[in-house]
Image: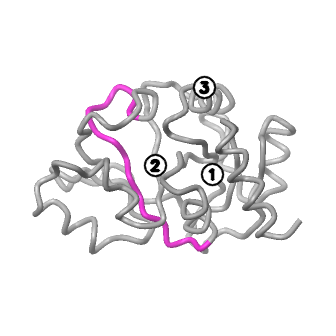
Amino acid sequence: MTVAESLDAAVAALRAGGVIAYPTEGVWGLGCDPDNDEAVAHLLRLKERDPAKGLILVAASIEQFGPWLEGLAPELHAPLVTSWPGPNTWLVPDNGRTHPLVRGAHDCVALRVSAHPDVAALCRAFGGPVVSTSANKASEPSAMSAAEVREIFGDELDAIVEGELGGHDKPSTIRDLISGQVLRA
């Protein structure tokens, strides 16, 4: 299957409420429609992840995050604009737009505009952000290849986007937008 064919299959799976895997900048990720309750709950069960931890949303452009950034003070847009696209995740105060399972026990939502061409293409084809969390079971190492994703999750995923990692050796940096504090380097 070509990258384009696997991308089409992944978008169809997202729209049908499925969970997919795809390469990101540093590790393989799992994703789903962030507005689909059942899909987000299924993803959390697959990962065996504590729902209180929350999840990251990834997009192709800052414009795709428009609804999540509504009401954000204009001066707080500058760090986002200057660090995106790239492996930089920002914790942005939730304006009420974020699904509770995505936000977890937090009053912020984690947002990243990806520089990875396959992730950006996925989000453009889907028409908005998707959930992005490492492809692994809780507290296990992240998958570094499609083969590892298949080994971990078998046939539990609805689609896998064929492609390669983006050349970074770790997951994205996570920073709090209000305080500037780095939570994961």
Magenta stretch encompasses residue 114 = yes
Is residue 115 shown above or below 36?
below
> How far apart in space, not on screen, are marks 1 and 2 (Cα)?
11 Å
**What are the residue bounds of the magenta stretch?**
103-117
Q: Quadrant of residue 36?
A: top right
> How far apart in space, not on screen, are marks 3 and 1 (Cα)?
18 Å
Q: Nearer the viewer, residue 161 or 16?
A: 16
Q: Amino acid at mark 3?
A: Glu
Residue behind mark 1: 29
Residue behind mark 3: 38
Q: Pointers 1 and 2 in contact (CB under 8 A)?
A: no
What residue is at 78 percent from the left and 69 percent from the top? 3
- Which one is earlier in the sequence, the residue at label 3 or at label 2? 3
Q: Residues within 10 Å of mark 2 (few under 14, many from 20)?
A: many
Q: Quadrant of residue 63?
A: bottom left
Image quarter of the C terminus: bottom left
Is residue 111 shown above or below 62?
above
> How far apart in space, not on screen, are marks 3 and 2 (Cα)?
16 Å
Secondary structure, mark 2, is strand
Q: Nearer the viewer, residue 26 or 38?
A: 38
Q: Nearer the viewer, residue 173 or 100?
A: 100
